[in-house]
């Protein structure tokens, strides 16, 4: 009979979360590398080069793959014969103690993203607790844990439907992808749950995301059952949509489709989709009473020989003194290297600014957006000699409802985020002669190398959502919406859908 010590369990949770914060699963790296080799879209290929370069850098520097270090989700399998030695906490409390230890580790501080009172004050808990914990009691005397750190951008693109028994699952799944946009940071993985009840389907989809990426092996040997047939069919049809890496248009949108199913009521067919983004972070371990779980790092020589560098013809832009006339020359899909000063702001900062303007209070002291850019980012805290931790973009559409006011009342001329913008935001961008740029989601450590200084200038109490002033040097971005309102997230996928073969895009 295995005897599990409380501290061993806590330390194992902490070690696992630190490990997955900077080591991608090997199957993910291998799959992105294979997609990179065959990709024909220059924009998508550049995005994947940044993703692979960032992955190697994080493995070497032991820093987070993405600035969004995730909400912790743990599936805990407790053996019926396992014995706990001197435990004074519930297993959920042990998981949270491990999360707390991992996220506050001074050698690799992880960003605290969890807020309590979700429909009220939304106060950051400060240590990324609590985790979402699921339990199963199983035969045996071991305790197994499957744990993930799930990014908010991809979680927000989850989909669920109660289909009729004879409805086509493939048609529904493929029809959801265009509406999901690029905020889930493809190329990634789709987890699909079919059957059970509403909540069971969602749980199956989340568990499916932790299965191995093995689509190339599956296609090579051929499907052996109906679920494998569905995986291949959905994989092929989703990639035929031409959405591509970061939504820029290309051959690879999904790296794999994993499906788990469960018996359901004769009148029902619940189906759930949850995507995994570039920051794919999960691992399994088992405790047998011998001590803390051990994790084997990947070898650097197993990473692909891909080292991103800016294109020689990339436009170099000085942010200081930029005008609307200057940005009017930029074209959708064009690569820029930004140098100079920009401000940051996410959801909470935008809401405060809009509220202050509505009350006639003006902007906070020291905050002036005139002819300047705002970067939608909530960085990781710095360690050692860093000026800022990993600082990749957050999803731009969440700021859409603030865009008209920001452009009309603050003098702002440009925004930087990830993924597409909605129609109203694009119309505001066009009307005000502004632009929207994107940085690559999932390349946060690489992006942070371009940041030369960082200081908080407003709303310090918001933590990672405070307004910073960054000074950057050759920060790589792509023009996503130009001053005439042309969007690369519309142009790119449409072009590549035609090239791939024009399968119908079903209505969402």
Image (cartoon, rainbow, N blue to C red):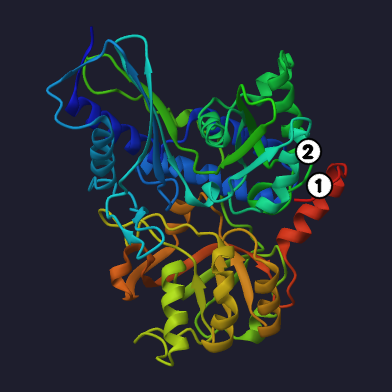
Residues marked 1 and 2 touching at CB (< 8 Å): yes
Percent x, y of residue 343:
44, 75
Q: Residues within 10 Å of mark 2 (few under 14, many from 20)?
A: some
Percent x, y of residue 211:
53, 26
Quarter of the image where one finds residue 105: top left
- In the rendered image, the residue lying farthest to the left is 86
Task: Report how far apart the C-alphas of labels 1 and 2 lie in the structure.
Answer: 7 Å
The residue located at (72%, 62%) in the rendering is 488
Percent x, y of residue 484:
74, 77
Quarter of the image where one finds residue 262: top right
Q: Which residue is mark 1?
A: 506
Tell me which label, 1 or 2, sits earlier in the chain.
2
321 or 27: nearer the viewer = 27
Relative to 246, does residue 139 appear above or below in the rendering? above
Q: Residues within 10 Å of mark 1 (few under 14, many from 20)?
A: few
Left or right of 90: which side holds 201? right
The residue located at (57%, 32%) in the rendering is 197
Relative to 92, does residue 401 appear above or below in the rendering? below
- In the rendered image, the residue lying farthest to the top is 1
Left or right of 474: which side holds 428? right
Left or right of 428: which side holds 284? left
Q: Which residue is mark 2?
A: 171
Numbered badge on residue 24: none
323 or 164: nearer the viewer = 164
Relative to 239, does residue 455 appear above or below in the rendering? below
């Amino acid at each position: 009979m295995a005897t599990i010590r409380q501290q061993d369990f806590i330390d194992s949770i902490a070690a696992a979360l630190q490990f997955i914060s900077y080591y991608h699963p090997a199957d993910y790296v291998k799959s992105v590398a294979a997609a990179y080799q065959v990709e024909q879209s220059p924009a998508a290929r550049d995005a994947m080069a940044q993703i692979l370069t960032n992955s190697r850098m994080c493995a070497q520097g032991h820093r987070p793959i993405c600035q969004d270090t995730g909400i912790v989700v743990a599936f805990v399998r407790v053996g019926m014969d396992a014995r706990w030695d001197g435990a004074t906490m519930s297993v959920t409390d042990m998981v949270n103690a491990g999360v707390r230890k991992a996220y506050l580790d001074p050698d690799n501080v992880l960003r605290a993203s969890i807020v309590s009172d979700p429909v009220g004050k939304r106060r950051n808990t400060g240590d990324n607790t609590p985790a979402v914990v699921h339990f199963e009691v199983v035969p045996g005397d071991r305790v197994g844990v499957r744990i993930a750190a799930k990014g908010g951008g991809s979680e927000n693109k989850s989909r669920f439907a109660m289909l009729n028994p004879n409805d086509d699952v493939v048609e529904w799944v493929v029809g959801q992808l265009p509406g999901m946009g690029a905020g889930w940071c493809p190329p990634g993985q789709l987890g699909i749950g079919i059957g059970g009840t509403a909540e069971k389907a969602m749980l199956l989809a989340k568990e499916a995301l932790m299965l191995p990426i093995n689509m190339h092996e599956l296609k090579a040997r051929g499907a052996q059952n109906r679920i494998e047939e569905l995986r291949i069919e959905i994989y092929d049809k989703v990639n035929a949509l031409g959405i591509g890496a970061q939504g820029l248009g290309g051959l690879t949108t999904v790296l794999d489709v994993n499906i788990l199913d469960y018996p359901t009521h004769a009148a029902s067919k619940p189906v759930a989709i949850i995507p995994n983004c570039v920051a794919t972070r999960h691992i399994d371990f088992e405790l047998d009473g011998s001590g803390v779980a051990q994790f084997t790092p990947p070898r650097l020589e197993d990473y692909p020989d891909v080292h991103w560098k800016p294109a020689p013809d990339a436009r170099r832009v000085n942010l200081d003194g930029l005008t609307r006339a200057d940005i009017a020359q930029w074209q959708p899909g064009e690569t820029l290297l930004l140098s100079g000063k920009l401000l940051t702001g996410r959801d909470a900062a935008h809401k405060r600014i809009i509220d202050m303007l509505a009350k006639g209070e003006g902007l906070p002291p020291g905050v002036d957006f005139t002819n300047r850019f705002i970067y939608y980012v909530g960085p990781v805290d710095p360690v050692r000699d860093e000026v800022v931790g990993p600082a990749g973009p957050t999803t731009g559409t969440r700021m859409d409802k603030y865009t008209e006011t920001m452009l009309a009342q603050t003098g702002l001329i440009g925004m930087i985020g990830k993924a597409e913008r909605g129609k109203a935001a694009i119309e505001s961008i066009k009307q005000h002669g502004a632009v929207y740029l994107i940085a690559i989601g999932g390349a946060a450590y690489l992006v942070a190398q371009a940041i030369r200084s960082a200081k908080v200038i407003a709303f310090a109490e918001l933590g990672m959502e405070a307004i910073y002033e960054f000074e950057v040097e050759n920060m790589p971005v792509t023009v996503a919406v130009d001053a005439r309102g042309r969007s690369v997230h519309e142009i790119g996928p449409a072009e590549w859908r035609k090239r791939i073969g024009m399968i119908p895009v079903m209505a969402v």
